[in-house]
Image: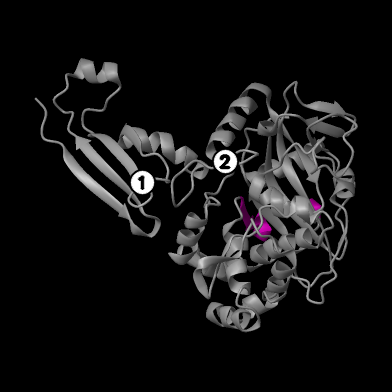
């Protein structure tokens, strides 16, 4: 005989959604029955009704989920990045999920995400990672200045109007590239960020343009990759640049699949070069197979896939050279930037090697590890070969992972 079930009500007033939980005590079940049903007797079974309080005619269809807390946690924690942080609905991303969670593009979720103060963490980001923030702004500007901005400036910002919390100042459905550029022009440079308190930075930006600070918050929060400046002791000295970053973008599920494939086939390292204007999208959508799509910039003579090379000289060639036209370039006061990524790649039969140009058709077999930025159009050592035993050992040392195999 079971005990009386308990009820819990979770009300999300800002988004007019409600969860009603019915907790059912299942300690009365026999051990064999619980095992057969895959039920944990010490945990209540939860029946959750999710519905809208106001949009009952034209809103989403109410849903009912049945789960146990531990089972739910085990299933959901590894894939939290696949769900909107506000409405908990699955994302629909063209290229699959990324590492960091984010808000979906529904206007109601954008309002809740920005007006409930979730993005106040941006202040800490500026205080502790000014170079990362500056890099993100530089990538955003480069994509916006590109003749290909209609294709590569994606996602377009979703920013609530600071003067009208019921309206979007930047709306993906009504794109205004010139207005975004004017707001970018008012965002403080790297040196200004490090020399002034955060509130003073915000005050300065608000004075120049009330949309500058909200846009900066969006640039930071929309980045769905984990990117941090590497300390000197963890940098790859043979890359000859002080601007080295750890760059991880694979969600737990993809990383788990990558490790499984790595156990079967082994892995190695190779460079991926791409113009800086493309990285605004890459950090938010991941490395994708651009071959035979409108994203393709270079030819695909060796077929469809992600193009890599063990030689730095080849990837530097793909990275292009960016000349900023603005009077106040955002990244370390440099007018020219080049950047390449160092990736770990599965050495399976699917990896097609055409001399020093490698093509990976399976995006799950490539994971970014490091990101290198060069100022003033300079590049590092163009003779680096990741297949050189000494180079390979140094990469493994910095990663701190001695299980990779060539």
Q: Quadrant of residue 194?
A: bottom right
Return the residue nearer the eye: 347 or 143.
143
Is the Cβ of the residue at disc 2 closer than 8 Å to that at disc 1?
Answer: no
Q: Which mark is residue 337?
A: none
Q: Earlier in the sequence, mark 2 or mark 1?
A: 1
Residue 404 % position (x, y): 66, 33
**Magenta-tinted stretch:** 225-239
- Residue drawn at the location 83% of the way across and 32% of the way down: 358
Query: Is any atom of residue 157 visible in this view?
Result: yes
Residue 135 % position (x, y): 70, 62
The answer to whether residue 317 is above or below residue 289 is below
Left or right for 335, reference 118: right
The answer to whether residue 2 is above or below residue 134 is above
- Residue drawn at the location 80% of the way across and 38% of the way down: 293
Magenta stretch: residue 288 in it?
no
Magenta stretch: residue 226 in it?
yes
Residue 28 % position (x, y): 13, 25
| Mark 1 Cα-neighbour bin, 10 Å: few <14, some 14–19, many ≥20 | few
Residue carrying label 2? 92
Left or right for 25, reference 114: left
Disc 2 versus disc 1: distance between alpha carbons? 23 Å
- Residue drawn at the location 59% of the way across and 62% of the way down: 218
| Mark 2 Cα-neighbour bin, 10 Å: few <14, some 14–19, many ≥20 | few
Residue 89 % position (x, y): 46, 43
The answer to whether residue 225 is above or below residue 30 is below
Residue carrying label 1? 56
Which element is circle 2 on? loop
Which element is circle 1 on? loop
Mark closer to the observer (2, 1): 1
């Amino acid at each position: 005989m079971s005990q009386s079930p308990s009820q819990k009500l979770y009300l999300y007033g800002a988004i007019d959604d409600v969860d009603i939980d019915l907790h059912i005590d299942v300690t009365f079940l026999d051990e064999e029955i619980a095992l057969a049903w895959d039920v944990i007797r010490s945990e209540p079974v939860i029946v959750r009704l999710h519905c809208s309080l106001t949009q009952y005619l034209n809103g989403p269809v109410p849903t009912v989920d049945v789960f146990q807390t531990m089972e739910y946690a085990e299933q959901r924690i590894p894939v939290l990045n696949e769900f909107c942080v506000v409405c908990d609905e699955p994302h629909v991303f063209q290229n699959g999920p990324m590492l960091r969670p984010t808000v979906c593009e529904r206007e109601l979720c954008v309002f809740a995400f920005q007006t409930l103060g979730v993005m106040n963490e941006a202040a800490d980001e500026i205080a502790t990672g000014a170079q990362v923030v500056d890099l993100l702004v530089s990538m955003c500007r480069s994509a916006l200045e590109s003749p290909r901005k209609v294709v590569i400036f994606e996602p377009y910002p979703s920013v609530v109007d600071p003067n009208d919390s019921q309206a979007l100042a930047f709306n993906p459905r009504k794109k205004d590239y010139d207005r975004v550029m004017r707001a970018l022009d008012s965002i403080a440079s790297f040196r200004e960020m490090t020399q002034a308190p955060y509130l003073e930075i915000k005050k300065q930006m608000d004075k120049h343009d009330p949309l500058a600070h909200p846009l900066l918050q969006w640039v930071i929060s929309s980045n769905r990759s984990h990117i941090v400046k590497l300390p000197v002791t963890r940098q790859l000295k043979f890359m000859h640049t002080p601007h080295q970053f750890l760059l991880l973008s694979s969600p737990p599920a993809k990383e788990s699949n990558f490790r499984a494939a790595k156990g079967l086939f082994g892995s190695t390292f190779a460079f991926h070069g791409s113009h800086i204007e493309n990285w605004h999208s890459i950090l938010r959508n991941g490395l994708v197979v651009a071959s035979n799509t409108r994203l393709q910039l270079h030819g695909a003579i060796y077929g469809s896939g992600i193009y890599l090379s063990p030689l730095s000289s080849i990837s530097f060639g793909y990275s292009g050279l960016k000349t900023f036209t603005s009077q106040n370039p955002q990244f370390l006061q440099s007018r020219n930037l080049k950047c390449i990524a160092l990736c770990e790649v599965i050495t399976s039969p699917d990896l097609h090697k055409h001399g020093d140009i490698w093509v990976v058709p399976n995006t799950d077999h490539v994971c970014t590890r490091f990101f290198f930025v060069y100022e003033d159009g300079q590049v590092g050592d163009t003779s680096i070969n990741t297949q050189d035993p000494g180079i390979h050992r140094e990469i493994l040392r910095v990663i701190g992972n001695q299980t990779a195999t060539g």
